[in-house]
Amino acid sequence: MFQPRRLAGGLLCALLPTLALAGVDDAALIDANSCSLDLWHTRIDGGGYQNYVSPTCRPGGNYQFTAVFGNEHEEGESEQVYGLEAKMLFTSLEAHGYGLGLVVGSEYLTEMSRWETQYALVPLTLGFADERALVHFNLGWERERSAETRNALTWGLGSEVGIAGPLVAIANVFGNDRSSSESSIEVGPRLALLDDKVLIDALFERELGGENTRAYTLALTYAF
């Protein structure tokens, strides 16, 4: 049985301007008094790529903190992106049969030299078949200072399904009501190794509108 965790897409920004609102988040925390490290590389069709490092630590209790350090390259130019996020869990899947939490965060763009985006979302996770299948629902709010419509309602629907042994299938769809071109879908396999201490994701992402941009991500998570 694999354990609920943050989806690798939970911090992807291959097609969208904000960090945590791209992808789908789960209503689960890492183990108490532990940390994890996410590394991922995203390559976008038509040029451009992104590299990210994201540590998460849970000092105890029902909350954890995440930092994001990113470098984006496009058309010969480079930009750094930083993010801070906190997650609190109100109910856990193991104790109550469903997980419910709250995620808040902000994103800093060096190009604009300011904290550009603030967001909050409520993740809900349901488990089926002895938690071999997980379904995640997200509903939230985002404020982007440079957008024509600054405030937006965000949403996401995701799933993790154990296929065989360490192999897990991931499928997410997410977006916001600011623009139909900012809705995307991502799918791919995950390998959960060493009692879920090491997770390897290979994801394909595509916009559902606009230019139908495609992106490919390889992500590694190590828990310690």
Image (tube, rainbow, N blue to C red):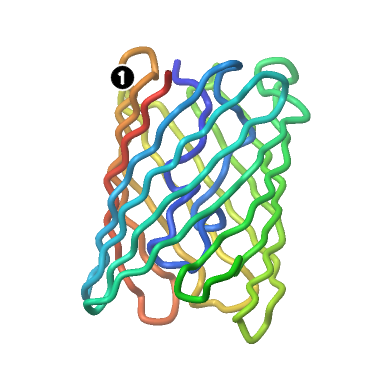
Vertical order, 104 against 100 (above or below): below
Q: How many marks?
A: 1
Q: Is residue 98 left or right of residue 75?
A: right
Nearest the eye: 178 or 104: 104
Vertical order, 98 against 12 (above or below): above
The residue wearing badge 1 is: 193
Nearest the eye: 164 or 119: 119
Nearest the eye: 5 or 53: 53
Say which residue appears at 29% left-offset and 51% top-offset.
217
Vertical order, 10 against 150 (above or below): above
Residue extending furthest bottom? 148
Q: At numbered mark 1, what does the secondary structure look like: helix, strand or loop?
A: strand
Percent position of residue 91, x then y:
76, 26
Vertical order, 182 against 80 (above or below): below
Q: In the image, what residue type sits under mark 1?
A: Leu
Q: Residues within 10 Å of mark 1 (few under 14, many from 20)?
A: some
Percent position of residue 166, x then y:
31, 21
Q: Is residue 72 left or right of residue 62?
A: left
Percent position of residue 11, x then y:
48, 50
Say which residue appears at 32% left-offset and 14% top-offset.
194
Say which residue appears at 38% left-offset and 62% top-offset.
14
In the picture, which quadrant includes the N terminus? top left
Say which residue appears at 54% left-offset and 48% top-offset.
24
Percent position of residue 18, x then y:
53, 63
In the picture, which quadrant includes the C terminus? top left
- Residue 48, picture quadrant: bottom left
